[in-house]
Image (cartoon, helix red, strand yellow):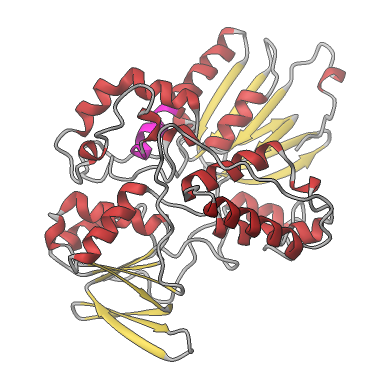
Amino acid sequence: MKKNTNKNSLANKKYRHLIVGDGLTAAAFMESYDLASGDELVIIGKNASRLGRGAAYAQDDDTKPWSYAYLLNSPANDIDGAFVEWLVQNWPDLEKCMKNRMPDWLTATHGFLKDSTIGSLNVPRAFYGQFMEEKSATKISELRNTGVIVTVVDALAVAIEEEGQKLVVHTNQKQSYKVDSVDIAPGNPANQRIDGDESNFSAPSLFGHEERIAEHVKKGCKIFCVGTNATMLDALRLCQAVRDEKSIQFIACSPRGTLPPALIPRIPKRLTKPQLKTGHKTAQSFLDDVRNAIEKAKTSGDEMREIRAGFRAFFIENSLQNFLQDPSEARKVSITLSHWLRGGTRDTIMDFHRLAKADICQIISGNVFAIEALSNGARVLMRDNEGNEISYETGFVINCAGASLASSFDPLTHHMLENKWIKICPISR
């Protein structure tokens, strides 16, 4: 977002650029923006001083049992080759950090500890956060060494307005920054809310509520997760981190009642190489083509990890516009495609299946619409696939449902929507 569209037109004037966000996209904006000596860069985010971590790769206090429990959804070498090199270089320290932690992630690394295969691991997300934080800090130092003035602000951007040829960004701490251009990366919509999901026996999300959830797990409460996605898998890891898994009681529920497939790597690494037709007129025609390519890959013996990684690499190199030019039709593709290519952490999904055989974990189908607090637990109200209302009594409920069409956004996004700087897509929402 720029007011001065031509930086070179500001001859003999110092340029001021601002980035909103503290995650991967904000870090990528910083990497790609061209600034010269005397120019200024302002970075505003909730945890901007730890730029690169964002909400996804944040780290709790090291003393918390769950601080290294959450794992990446994908093997490390599907994410960043430089990250794999970082893992190899730092492995002794990482191994020391993970020693004696529950669940026993180190045992799961057996067979992958050679430099050529360490990238096959689903490593703790906090490690990737550490890598990105270090990488961002290095880039900030490089900018400062070239004479760029870098200001990092731990705050939330809440509003943006025009002032002549400038943009002014306001924060929740009553600060204002007048700049020439702005990159905005505020993060994903909030977790969808469910009636009654915040009580003595329920939490509206996993993240940020770990302390209270852990206390109920330690007491032996039966944990009920609304959702069977990656956040639900994190909730299981939290349970395993604070209590012997043989005494856990864990239930996951979603409309489909299914888990994502585990992304299991094979060595040597291989990727599906899709071949898709061009000239599709409708989203359905394109999706049919993708579905056929996925089934063809499965028939040839490709695993879900290879299919997912292969398609992701393919679409990085090949724009959707090459295959489906109608923007309205193209907007219909993403939700279905994301579901088909979904996958999850190998370690936790395999743990879930193992624990299900031991009657420790259970997965059920149902569409949860409300949670009622009881005197010593909660009642989950849901509808089955036929629309019948059913209920389930449990000890504690965690809302892991993820974002929805009705999810709320961050304050800055709401401000831009209200002022019609941006609008919600009528097709994908």
Residue 390, horizontal then vertical, whole percent: 36, 88
Residue 282: x percent and y percent? 80, 63
Q: Is residue 177 left or right of residue 110?
A: right
Q: Main secondary structure of the magenta part?
A: helix
Classify residue 43 by image quadrant.
Answer: top right
Q: Indicate the quadrant containing the N terminus: top left, top right, bottom left or bottom right.
A: top right
What residue is at 83 percent from the left and 29 percent from the top? 4
User: Residue drawn at (70%, 32%), measured in percent from left and top?
Assistant: 178
Please name the residue shown 74% across and 58% down the image: 286
> Is the residue 370 above or below the residue 53 in the image?
below
State the extent of the magenta-drawn residues as a range.
122-131
Left or right: 339 in relation to 226? right
Direction front: furthest residue: 300
The foreground one among 41 and 359 is 359
Number of marks in the rendered image: 0
Left or right relative to 336: residue 299: left
Question: Above or below — where is 422 with respect to 79?
Answer: below
Quadrant for residue 157, please give it. top right
Q: Position of residue 347 (x, y in %)?
A: 31, 47
Q: Would residue 424 be counted in the magenta stretch?
A: no
Q: Does 149 sit above or below residue 298?
A: above
Task: Please tell me which residue lies in front, 296 or 363.
Answer: 296
Q: x%, y% of residue 359? A: 19, 69
